[in-house]
Amino acid sequence: MVQLHVKRGDESQFLFNTSVDAPLETVIQQITAIYNGRLKVERICSEIPELADHGITLPPNMQGLTEEQIEELKLKDEWEDKCVPSGGPVFRKDEIGRRNGHAPNDKMKAVLMKTVEEAKALISKKQVQANICVTMEMVKEALDPLRGAVMIVYPMGLPPHDPIRMEFEDREDLSGTQASLQVMTEDECQLWWAGKEMQRRKKLQDYVGKNEKTKLVVKIQKRGEGAPAREPLITEEQQKQMMMHHYRRQEELKKLEEADDDSHLDSEWSDRQALKKQFQGLTNIKWGPR
């Protein structure tokens, strides 16, 4: 299998296994799906701690309002009594006024947070260092426990306007957010290698040959962003090793310069008569009484 190290800019994303016979159209579709799937998991994992701390999201027309404004406008959250966490709520006010403050108890909060950590680890960028390839199945394995944990804590479900439920139902609205800039559609995604765009109508072997044991660093880019920066000739780790070697060498030279240049004359190896004395048995002679 060919191993692709997928990057976005200079940042590692994940490892992906494919074949030299695979059409690049298919490879790009699969990479795009995994890339967007990981972003979805990350978005959900960033929202669940807010759910655990402050309860469900208020209706859009109540978000950001003070209690006085809500009372004055005679607004009511119809989902407050429907979406009650298991074991009863604990009130933790949301200072920004986005959630209703009726949070799960500590036991239910622990269920949510543990699942979040497990999901984040499954699709983490550290999997690159561990040489573990990410698949769409792994993305689903991260999503399913998150969905299950939310159902355990909120058996009646979340309000339809809650961003976590919208993510699970693929109804998320990312317009106007930073997250929208990260997501890529299949049509706009480009795959680059060695400073060249890999054309969809070709196969991977048209670029790398037929060796199935090939490892490549490829970069995904949105159409119109131009060519990404090429990979440096040496890695950051290699550069660190070279600098350490250079530093140690400089220290060794410094010590040699500080040492007495004539100190070697007292050494046995510098005595021209050492070999002759050894044959004559004149080595290790000590004067004086024993």
Image: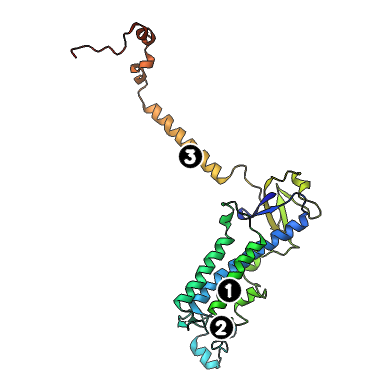
Disc 1 to disc 2, C-alpha distance: 22 Å
Name the residue carrying label 2. 58
* Identity, as a three-letter code, of the amino acid under mark 3: Met
For label 3, the residue is 244
Label 3 SS: helix
Instruction: Give how far across and how far down residue 37 sits, in percent.
Output: 65, 65
| Mark 1 vs 2, N-terminal side | 2
- Please, which residue is most extreme toward the left here? 289
Q: Amino acid at mark 1?
A: Gly
Marks 1, 2: nearer the viewer: 1
Task: Verify CB contact (< 8 Å) between mark 3 and mark 2.
Answer: no
Locate the C terminus by quadrant: top left
- Which class describes the residues within 10 Å of circle 2: few (<14), some (14-19), or many (20+)? many
Which circle's residue, 1 or 3, is located before the other in the chain?
1
Q: Which mark is residue 279?
A: none
Question: Is residue 223 visible in the rendered structure shown here?
Answer: no
Which residue shows up at 58% across the image and 71% down it? 146
Name which quarter of the figure residue 239 lies in: top right
Q: In this figure, what is the number of numbered marks?
A: 3
- Tell me how far mark 3 sits from mark 2, CA to CA: 55 Å
Nearer the observer: mark 1 or 3; the answer is: 1
Pointer 3 local density, CA inside 10 Å: few below 14, some 14–19, many at least 20? few
Q: Real-space Cα distance between discs 1 and 3? A: 49 Å
* Image position of 50 with respect to 230: above or below: below
Q: Quadrant of residue 259?
A: top left
Q: Position of residue 227 (x, y in %)?
A: 70, 52
Is residue 9 among what the camera can see?
Answer: yes
Disc 2 secondary structure class: loop
Position of residue 211 in the picture relative to residue 90 (left or right): right
Left or right: 65 as drawn, with respect to 15: left
From the image, tell me which residue sits under label 1. 148
Position above or below: 287 against 159:
above
